[in-house]
Image: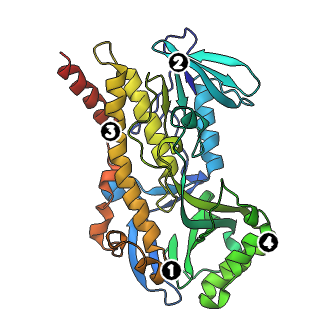
Amino acid sequence: MAFNRDSSNSETLTITSAAPSRSLQTSQGYNFEAITFVTDPEHEITGKLYFGQKDAYGYDGMRITRKVLNHELTEMAKEAGVEIHYGKKFTKIVHEDANGVVFEFADGSQERAEMLIGADGIYSKVRSCIFPDIYPDYSGHLAITYSFPRANMHIEENLPLPVSLRGKQGSFIISPQAEGGKELLIGRQLKYEQKIHFRWDTSLQDKQALIDIIQRDPNAWSPLVQAAQAQVTSPETDFLHVWPFYTVPKMDRWHSLTGKVVILGDAAHAIPPPAGQGANQALEDSYSFAILLANLNDKVSLSDALTAWEAYRMERMDKVLKLTNRVLTIRMTDEERASMPEHMRWDEIDGSDAGKSELGWLYLVDIDRDVKNSIKTLDARDR
């Protein structure tokens, strides 16, 4: 993403948490309050984690597919006059100084911009240019996911959905998705010690290998999970993916020495998916960074502003990573949890009414206020 603040044909894309210019319709996803943690095969409820709760946060959670989200964001960009170029692959930074950055694409063409923003994922090429010694770390766990029509599988009415079922061989997650919950997403979390590179390891490129992992131990599970395992071979099953759990080591900054190259999202702080915060935090990065740039003035240096913004975001990411590890650990087998360091052997999540506001720090954040106050503090300090 290239940024030229003073370009005569540039447009401003404004997104506010209180009043977005474009909103997702509830018909495009599945609304819910909490994910319930249950033992299998006993189906004993051990806790709930509220991913949304109108009384506590002002809104429920909504599960949508990446396809829907990508479409909505693309349409917002079009409406704002932001042009998106496809078929370009960034390769290297040619030169950067206080006036901007020159970068090159795989076809040999070069561009110059006031700022280069690397929002290019966990294996970020932009990050490798400014932090060549930072590599993603594999956690030793992965998830395999797939989806199919909800009508294909009977689920008892008293089973709370979405649900995370933990057994002796790991966990299965069952979550409605799509319009009105017409589909079921099934995810299996399990330990897989062989290091996986990128999204696919050579041993898992065969679809049958994934099916075998999902179906390898049906007798260890309740009839409900067995039914979900059986659906993986249905002709109507879609989106069979393997998702290795990677993190990006914590860095002391997310910008180059000139401040003209910045990384955000998974490029800066990739986290595993158990708490569903990867895309959310990338959006928070983008929004807070846009607020920062829009409110900068000549009295505050770019370097100081970036340092303050990064400190704010890093503190929040520390808490998000703690939440992620908590959910990851709760979904482990008893044997796996017993082998974890003592400080990571989390208690079960509070499923009472008191737990409904447990994630207030996550959902009630005022990003506009926080970033603007940070700039005001820097401005006052430099007077």
Compared with residue 140, is residue 170 higher up or lower down, i.e. above or below?
Answer: below
The outermost residue toward the top is 8
The alpha-carbon separation of the residues under discs 3 and 4 comes to 45 Å
Quadrant where the N terminus is found in the figure: top right
Residue under the point 42% across and 42% down: 251
Percent coordinates x, y for residue 125 in the rendering:
61, 36
Is there CB contact under 8 Å for labels 4 and 1? Answer: no
Dot 3: what SS?
helix
Q: Is residue 114 visible?
A: no
Q: Label for residue 166? A: 1
Q: What's the residue type where badge 1 is placed?
A: Arg
Q: Label for residue 311? A: 3
Dot 4: what SS?
helix
Is there CB contact under 8 Å for labels 3 and 1? Answer: no
Q: What's the residue type where badge 4 is placed?
A: Gln
Q: Crowding near pointer 1: few (<14 within 10 Å), some, many (20+)?
A: many
Q: What's the residue type where badge 2 is placed?
A: Glu
The alpha-carbon separation of the residues under discs 1 and 2 comes to 51 Å
Is there CB contact under 8 Å for labels 3 and 4? Answer: no
Q: Label for residue 96? A: 2
The alpha-carbon separation of the residues under discs 3 and 2 comes to 24 Å
The earlier-in-sequence mark between 1 and 2 is: 2
The alpha-carbon separation of the residues under discs 2 and 4 comes to 48 Å
Percent coordinates x, y for residue 181 in the rendering:
60, 63
Residue under the point 54% across and 11% down: 7
Q: Nearer the viewer, mark 1 or mark 2?
A: 2
Quadrant of the image occupied by residue 289: top left
Q: Is residue 180 visible?
A: yes
Q: How many marks?
A: 4
Compared with residue 106, is residue 136 higher up or lower down, i.e. above or below?
Answer: below
